Amino acid sequence: MSELELKKIEIMAREVTVKEKELDHKISAADKSAWRSPLVVAVLAATLAAFSNAAITYYSSHLDREAAATKFERDNKLAESAAERERILEMIKIGEPEQVQRNLQFLVDTELVKAPATVASLQNYYKDREPGTGPGTSQTQLTDSGGYSRRQLFKSGTTLTYAFMEKPSAAMLEAVGEAANEWMQHANIRLAFIQNANDAIIRIMPSRTRNASMIGRSALNASADKPTMWLFEHPSFGTSEKAVILHEFGHALGFVHEHQNPSSEIPEDVKKAYEYYVKMSPRNMYLLNKSNVYPCIRDFDPISIMISTIPSEFTVGKVKFGGATALSESDKLCIAQMYPNHTAEE
């Protein structure tokens, strides 16, 4: 190969090298240009913004969840604290001091009151308490003897007026009149319906939630614009509904629940029953205490209109109590003792 031909090949090789470098430069420039393209920049910015927003949203949600959890926990603690206070206050209203102490100890034992400071305060208080002192009403103040008392009763021969605080149905009005007449047949007391509730001793509130009544003379302590009895407003009043009205008027006349009769011996599974009733409402603690204001002397009457239903699972032997629909013979004798034909000394 001649020298001239070698020169031509060398020149051509150099040109190829130059072309390759130009191509590499163009490719590099094209890559940089693509990343600087407005479209590419916009896409990248949007992606970055979306990522940032997602991160902020996640963190914000996390903070919100933490705040909600904290508020929920705080609200729960406040509600439990309020419930414990209510349970304690209700126990203080029930019976004589020793009974109050037993009730409060039960609340602690079953953890119905478990705030450490409250438990410690109760224990410290009762550690040095002298018998017969402390919250509650002394047995000697409340009862005549043996748990029997006339102190919740009205004077024999009294006319007790009753009225409705809201207009009742015709069926309720009729059922209440029948119940009042039934009790009057066996007692020296008169139950008279009047129109003006503010002037009535027994003030009845038709209700959608409850049946209840204040006991005897305790109604005199209620403000004249407040009810002393609540009766559930049924569409109609059959035997069982009328039985409830008889029961509530029994309370208004001074009866407590019959299973609170000092002579009753219901074989209760006490712990289970207390837990059930008290968790529904601390006001229910009284349901399983013997009464120290029982209004007459009689043996326990399992078919009394005044016995409150006790489910079979709360008694030893699975015996159910309650369900009476009429005054028993013992109820009639008891109300006659409470309101005899001669005037009983108050």
Image (spheres, rainbow, N blue to C red):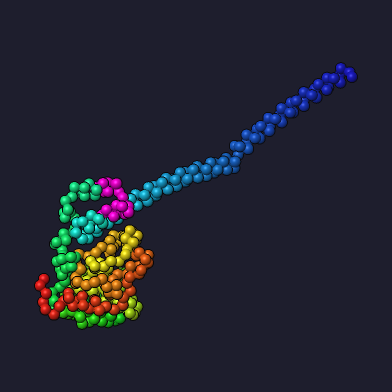
- Horizontal arrangement in the rendering, residue 190 relative to residue 27 (left or right): left
Residue 303: image location, x then y, percent: 29, 74
Q: Is residue 244 visible?
A: no
Is residue 114 shown in magenta? yes
Q: Residue at x 65, y 32 (%)?
A: 29
Is residue 281 shown in magenta? no
- Residue 240, compared with residue 116, is above or below; it is below
- Horizontal arrangement in the rendering, residue 31 relative to residue 304 (left or right): right
| Of residues 47 and 157, the one drawn nearer to the viewer in this rendering | 157
Q: Quadrant of residue 165?
A: bottom left
| Of residues 221 and 215, the one drawn nearer to the viewer in this rendering | 215
Residue 134: image location, x then y, percent: 17, 54
Q: Residue furthest top?
A: 3
Q: Quadrant of the N terminus?
A: top right
* Magenta stretch, residue numbers: 104-121
Q: Quadrant of the C terminus?
A: bottom left
- Horizontal arrangement in the rendering, residue 325 relative to residue 220 (left or right): right
Count of numbered circles on the image: 0
Residue 319: image location, x then y, percent: 36, 68
Q: Residue at x 17, y 53 (%)?
A: 131
Q: Quadrant of residue 140?
A: bottom left
Type of secondary structure dominating the magenta stretch = helix
| Of residues 193 and 311, the one drawn nearer to the viewer in this rendering | 311
Q: Residue at x 34, y 49 (%)?
A: 74
| Of residues 135 and 150, the one drawn nearer to the viewer in this rendering | 150
- Residue 129, compared with residue 329, is above or below; it is above
- Horizontal arrangement in the rendering, residue 324 relative to residue 262 (left or right): right
- Residue 71, compared with residue 16, is above or below; it is below
Residue 234: image location, x then y, percent: 33, 76
